[in-house]
Image (tube, helix red, strand yellow):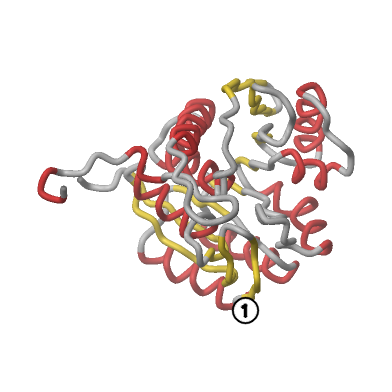
Amino acid sequence: MKPKTKILIIAGSDSSGGAGIQADIKTVTSLGGYAMTAVTAITAQNTTGVSSIVAIPPKEITKQIVFTAKDIKPDAIKIGMLHSKEVIREIISSLKKINITKVVLDPVMVAKGGAKLINDQAISILRDELIKRVFLITPNVPEAEVLIGRKINNMDEMILAGYMLIHLGAQNVLIKGGHLKGSIVQDILVSKNELHIFKNKKLKTKNTHGTGCTLSSAITTFLGCGKPLYKSCELGIKYVNDAIRSNLNYGKGHGPVNHLTSVMLNKKFK
């Protein structure tokens, strides 16, 4: 099968394979895309938490992005973990050089185990400068709270948060509602002229490590294939729910989802 789209992933590495750039590569590949990468940081982590983070020098991140894109031009870009203001400034500079319009930013701030993955200065630059330069941002509720500086307790407040982020310069915002209580997960897609609510039954499992990375990469892949934003979000959410439903139950903490949920193996590989 020939890949349907080329995706450049800018994100941190997760040694356990459940989140970060490993989850991104698996997602893009499982959905029929060709994945390229620019690693922003190396983490030692597993399902119980993060034990260490080693930053990649900002200039080396730029080299990865620009040198790769010069040879194989991506159809879309997914951005994940950006841990410092210097890295974010380099990313902004790199985006100007390679000029790709379909850019999805997952503003990763805290790992599933609770480790903080970005500092306060970086959050300010991400909010004030980077979100204006991407096509879609995909914060979960805690991340949206940090970006707007207020609590979110229900769907109406999620919608308000979405419009506040639009006011800050975001083009499109998908706020993921999985952190709120209730048996239904509501994800809110907001733009200047549109509002969509995706409703799905909440799946009861602790094995949700990497869902945010997986969703943003899935949406990026569908966008890269030429699908419109609403359809890309709808299909991305469906892919993630199917991946969670597999309930792999690997590890002692928050286990990974099953990225292979979309893959049918050829007979000769069985």
Is residue 3 visible to us here? yes
The residue positioned farthest toward the left in the image shown: 268
Q: Badge 1: few (under 14), some or many (20 or more) residues near its Cα, within 10 Å? A: few
Q: Residue 53 location, x and y as percent?
A: 65, 73
Q: Residue 137 location, x and y as percent?
A: 65, 42
Question: Residue 264 versus residue 81: which sits nearer the camera?
Answer: 264
On the rendered structure, is 199 left or right of 261?
A: right
* Residue in the image at 60% along x and 76% along y: 56
Task: Please determine whether, in this image, residue 165 is positioned above or below residue 37.
Answer: above
* Residue in the image at 64% along x and 41% along y: 138
* Residue in the image at 48% along x and 47% along y: 249
Is residue 194 visible to us here? no
Task: Please determine whether, in this image, residue 240 is positioned above or below residue 28.
Answer: above
Question: Residue 220 versus residue 144: which sits nearer the camera?
Answer: 144
Q: Residue 250 location, x and y as percent?
A: 47, 52
The residue positioned farthest toward the right in the image shown: 150
* Secondary structure state at the residue bearing disc 1: loop
On the rendered structure, is 238 left or right of 158?
A: left
* Residue in the image at 82% along x and 57% along y: 124
Q: Which residue is mark 1?
A: 57
Task: Please determine whether, in this image, residue 28 is positioned above or below residue 47.
Answer: above
Number of numbered discs overlaid on the protein picture: 1
Q: Residue 90 location, x and y as percent?
A: 65, 68
Q: For residue 206, which quarter of the picture?
A: top right
Q: For residue 265, which quarter of the picture?
A: top left
Quadrant occupied by the N terminus:
top left
Q: Amino acid at mark 1?
A: Pro
Task: Please determine whether, in this image, residue 232 is positioned above or below residue 99.
Answer: above
